[in-house]
Structures are given as structure tokens and as C-alpha cells.
Image: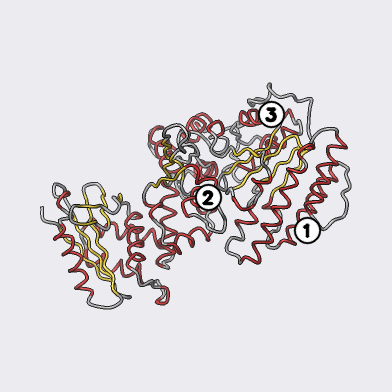
Amino acid sequence: MESRLPIGIQDFVKIRENNYHYIDKTIYIHRLTSGSGGAFFLSRPRRFGKSLLISTMEAFFKGQKDLFTGLFIYDKAEWSISYPVIKLDWTSVGHSTRKQMEDGMIEILKRIGKSYQIELNQSENAAMVFEHLIYSLHEKTGRKAVVLIDEYDVPILDNLKEPGEVLEPIREFLQGFYRILKASDEHLQFVFLTGITKFAKVSVFSALNNLVDITMDRDYAAICGWTQDEIETNFEPYIDLMAKENNSTRQEVLDAIQYWYNGFSWDGDVFVYNPFSTLLLFSKKVFDNYWFATATPAFLIEVIKERNDIKCVLCPSEIVGTSFNSFDYKTLDTKLLLFQTGYLTIKNVKTGRLGVPPVYTLDVPNNEVRNSLLEYMVSSYASYPLTDTVILRDRMRQQLLNGEDTSFEESVKELFAGIPYQLHIPKEAYYHSLILLWLTLLGFEIQGEVSTNKGRIDAVWKLEEQVIITEVKFANEGDTDRLIQDAFKQIYEAGYYERYKSRKTTLLAIGIAGKKISCKITQLPL
């Protein structure tokens, strides 16, 4: 292990000069820059290497040849030509208000200008300063400028829950700022923007009608993130060490790493690992939730809870390809929001006849995201401490498998007890969603709302040889025992269990009445 792990380091120069591990992605920079120039956009979730990609591009366009020794692009680039670079990162600029954005961006643009001995005109308009800098760099150096913008959408994402009077001026600022790129086209050699979302209503994409979106382009599917081959080739010593310390084979370690952290895809064919989680795994040698804990905006969980929209988290869902271009920050389509932020990914693509848009199957990428997302959602639904969910989960899973109905009922009551009375939603669907989330977190495989010739089962859950048929009953007030009886009566009369009689089967029915929780576990007749 001669090189060090670059945990949290997104500076290409620092990584190369200080012998940190670097996975060579310069083949993609070569593809993007082999032509006469262009303007490109790439969407990827947080902590996926977008900033490192931007930093690598900066070094490349500045002609820092020595940093690329041994990399794919080293003997393929024309190093005698370099370009002036404007690199902007919205995470480094205050963006709570439009004025804060104007002032912060003007300071950064002036700083870049000074590095090229250019004094920019005084102005309170960041867009005008931006335009002046692009023109002046071309005039002074004789080379067209390169503009690299990292996290272009952060000002909107960080203010999504703010009222319109706060968010709209921010959107208007970005719209005017990005229009400069189109107006300055004759002075630009290359433009590259990264972000998490492709907001349809920001108008950056309509203003830049020459902007090429490579987010779902097969040629750039692995531009960020690491493939299975890159993991095995570049981290072999770490994999071998984990195998030795855990008394496991190399393949067993690879299988565990793949189960936990692989599975992100933007074309349904090439699947990649999240670099942040993988680096921390190799550093700590412990399988844990790394990326999710640092990349999950609170508003995401709240949006799901407010809409009680959990199906896309529990089961694969389909979406037409044209939908990816209609994301609007005002409507926040749940599936698109989860996809663009990394909590759903493309698992399969079905192409139809010529001229018909493809259909994409979306699902949760891997074990880290699935378990963590479920824990956060359960905690939000039940107002239950996130730190205690794992303990309660393991306890209830054992109670359920052992048929301990009294103990299980007490645990269910504990789960629901944290919901403040005023937050109780008097709808069966709310409690049904919480139960579905919780049973999935317990490790049971969901079989959706199973239809039979006599009705539809709320849910069927399977774990090894156990099958649990669930019926949730709700009433604002009334006899909980009667609700339990109604649940069992529906299951028996509709014969929901018939198709599972060949298995060793356990039946669970849950009745909910106001703040009172009752449940019962019983063995089905075989």
C-alpha cells in the first residue's frame, strides 16, 4: 500500500503531488476535449467525485503535464497549448440571499482575474463581472477561456424549503448568470457544469441550447464512481488485508463490498461504487453507512413523508425516458428527486420500437442506501430516535420469527409511542406505510399488494421459510380486539394464505385504533 487513501480530498494537484491513490478517469476528459470544444453538463449525487473531475480538468487545461505522468491522457494531449481557466464552486459561495450570492461571486471572479493580472470593473452585478472576465481572458492570453462550474444547483437545493420570496430571486440570479455563457460563446473554448439535479425551470438549459447533457450517456457512464474492475485492480492490497483480518476469502470480501456499496448506474448497464463509502471502508475495514450519513438532505425525507409516497423505495418502479428532462423544483416529482440525488438508480432499460422512448426501471442501489433510507424514514414517520432503530429492529425481528406475539406487540407500541398525538394522521395508509417500512427494515422481502381471486392482500413478506401475511386495520376509536378479529376474518375468508400452505407459515395481523396499538401473531393452518 504505497499510496495513501484520499479520503475527503477533491484536489487533483494535491492528490498527485502527495502520492494519494488516484483512479484514472482521464480517458473521459480525452473524449470530451478531443473535438473543437463544447459545453457539457453532468449530473451525479453528492460525494461521487464531481469536484475531483472538475479539478482534474482544471489541471489539464492549464497544461500541468507532469501531474498526468502515467495516466491515459499523458501521451495523447497537446501539452504545448494551455487555456485560461475560470473554475467556480457554488459550495464555497454564500447563497442564502441573492445579495449574498452577488457579493460572494464577484469576489471570486475578481480573485481569478487578479491571478491573470486582470483588473475587473467595479459592479454590483456578478453576471456583468463574469462576462468581463471571460472577454478579458481571451483578449489578454490570446486563448479562449475554459469555464468549469461545480455544483451549479446548490443555491436552489439548499433553499428548496424556503418560501417563494426567498427562492425566486435566487433562481432569477442563476438564470441571468448562466446566460452569460451563451452570450460569450465566441470567447469560450470549453464549458463544463456539474450538479445533482437538472432543473427544467432554471432556464440554464434553454439559454444554453448547445449544452450537451452527458448524464445518461453510455460513453460516460463511469466518469464518476468506480467500476468493479477498478475496485479489484486498484485496491487489491486493501481487499487482501480485509480477507486476512476477517478469516475470509478474497471473493467473500468482494461479494460483501459489492452487496453494500455497488449498484449505482445511469445507463442500466455500467454499475459503479460510490468512492466516498469505498474509501472509508478500506480505511476503517468496517461495513457501515458512510455516504448516506453525509449526503442525505433532511428535505428529502420530509418530501416522502408528506406525500406518504413509499412504494418506489420498497419496490422497483418504472419511468419513461422523457420524464428525466421535466424535473421542476416547484413540483419535486418524488421518483425523479430520489433518482437525481442517488437514492434510486437505473437497474434496467427497456427499449421499444423505433421512435418510442425507453422505459427505465428504478430501484434502490445497494444495501447501504436501502437500510439507511428505511431507518431514516421509519424514524421520521414514528418520531422514533434514529440511534435506537437498529436495536429495536433486531429485537422485533427475533420476536417475529419466534412468534412472540405479546413481546412483539409491546415493541410495536414502543415504535408508535413516539408519534405526538397532534401528528397522528387519521388514515389507515399512514400506519400501513410505517408498518411496510418497518417490516422491510426487519429484512423481509416484500411482495407488494398481492391480488387474489377474492381480494387484495395488504402485503406479503417472506424471509427464508417464513411467510407473513399482513392486514392493517385502522379506526379513530373502537374496540381493538374487534379490529384484530376483522383482520383475521378477512385473511381467512378471502383465503389469502392458500398459495403459501406448502410452507412453514406465520400469520401477523395488526389493528390500530387511535393511539392504541394491538397486534397478534398466529400459525396458519397447514
**3D distance between C-alphas at marks 1 and 2:** 29 Å
Q: Which mark is residue 103?
A: 1
State which tag comes first along the sequence, 1 or 2. Answer: 1
Please indicate whether residue 124 sits to the left or right of residue 274 in the image. Answer: right
Q: Which mark is residue 116?
A: none
In terms of depth relative to the viewer, which is nearer, 294 or 331? 331
**3D distance between C-alphas at marks 3 and 2:** 31 Å
x and y, in percent, of residue 398 in the image: 27, 57
The reply to whether callout 3 and callout 2 are in contact (CB within 8 Å) is: no
Hey, what amino acid is under mark 2?
Thr
Q: Which mark is residue 68?
A: 3
Residue 241 can be seen in this image: no
Which residue is identified by label 2?
A: 341
**3D distance between C-alphas at marks 3 and 1:** 36 Å
- The residue depicted at 47 percent of the width and 38 percent of the height is 357
x and y, in percent, of residue 372 in the image: 44, 53
x and y, in percent, of residue 225 in the image: 54, 38
